């Protein structure tokens, strides 16, 4: 049984999020998702997510392709999370390409191409203009 781990905020859940989760699951048999907390998101993006962490986690854990979820409190804890979840594979979108190569010593690190033409930021901009 291959355990796959991925991370993300998954704010305003959209097709790009679904596709990366489905492709991540297809690389193994058990998918674990680390959901960025609101505080971590603020530190990364300097704004609060539209949907709070409880709601974002609830949505992700209901997906058919997802087996387990937890809160990602800090970007610095990646190694600990990989060890704790016993992940065989770490999957991230290629906007993070190269950023997690240091974990190649404890798991396989795979970057998947992002789904083009959709992002939470773009959705927010479209809604703002309406
Ligand atoms: N994604 C994608 N295609 C899109 C948009 C997003 O494949 N059009 C992927 C991202 O590459 C990422 C995942 O969906 O792997 C979640 O995206 P975000 O919610 O934007 O995640 P982010 O805030 O970048 O958090 O520790 C890493 C971070 O927590 C990742």
Image: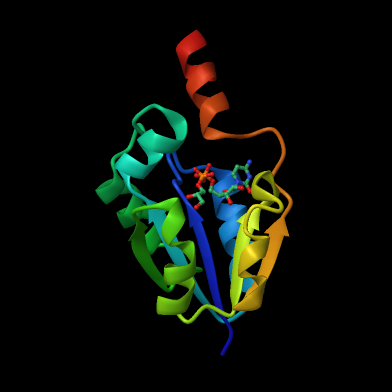
Q: Residue furthest left?
A: 54
> Can residue 25 be seen?
yes
Residue 60 in the image: above or below residue 41: below
The picture places residue 19, in percent across and down from the top left corner, at 62, 54
The picture places residue 127, in percent across and down from the top left corner, at 47, 18
Residue 77 position by quadrant: bottom left
> Can residue 64 be seen?
no
88, 19: nearer the viewer: 88
The picture places residue 100, in percent across and down from the top left corner, at 62, 59
Q: Residue furthest bottom?
A: 1
105, 58: nearer the viewer: 105
Residue 74 in the image: above or below residue 120: below
Q: Residue furthest top?
A: 129
Residue 42 position by quadrant: top left
Looking at the image, what colour scheme do you see? rainbow
Name the residue at 64% across, 48% down: 96
Name the residue at 37% across, 66% down: 69
The N terminus lies in quadrant: bottom right
Answer left or right for 36 relative to 55. Answer: right
Total residue callouts: 0
Name the residue at 28% across, 40% down: 52
Answer left or right for 105 relative to 43. Answer: right
Name the residue at 35% across, 48% down: 56
The picture places residue 87, in percent across and down from the top left corner, at 52, 78
Answer left or right for 10 relative to 48. Answer: right
């Amino acid at each position: 049984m291959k355990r796959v781990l991925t991370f993300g905020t998954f704010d305003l859940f959209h097709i790009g999020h679904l596709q990366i989760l489905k492709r991540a699951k297809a690389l193994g048999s058990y998918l674990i998702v680390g959901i960025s907390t609101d505080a971590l998101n603020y530190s990364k993006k300097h704004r609060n997510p539209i949907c709070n962490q409880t709601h974002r986690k609830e949505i992700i854990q209901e997906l058919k392709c997802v087996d387990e979820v937890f809160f990602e409190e800090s970007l610095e804890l990646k190694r600990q999370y990989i060890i704790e979840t016993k992940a065989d594979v770490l999957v991230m979108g290629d906007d993070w390409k190269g950023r997690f190569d240091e974990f190649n010593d404890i798991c396989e690190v795979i970057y998947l191409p992002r789904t083009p033409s959709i992002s939470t930021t773009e959705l927010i901009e479209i809604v703002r203009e309406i």
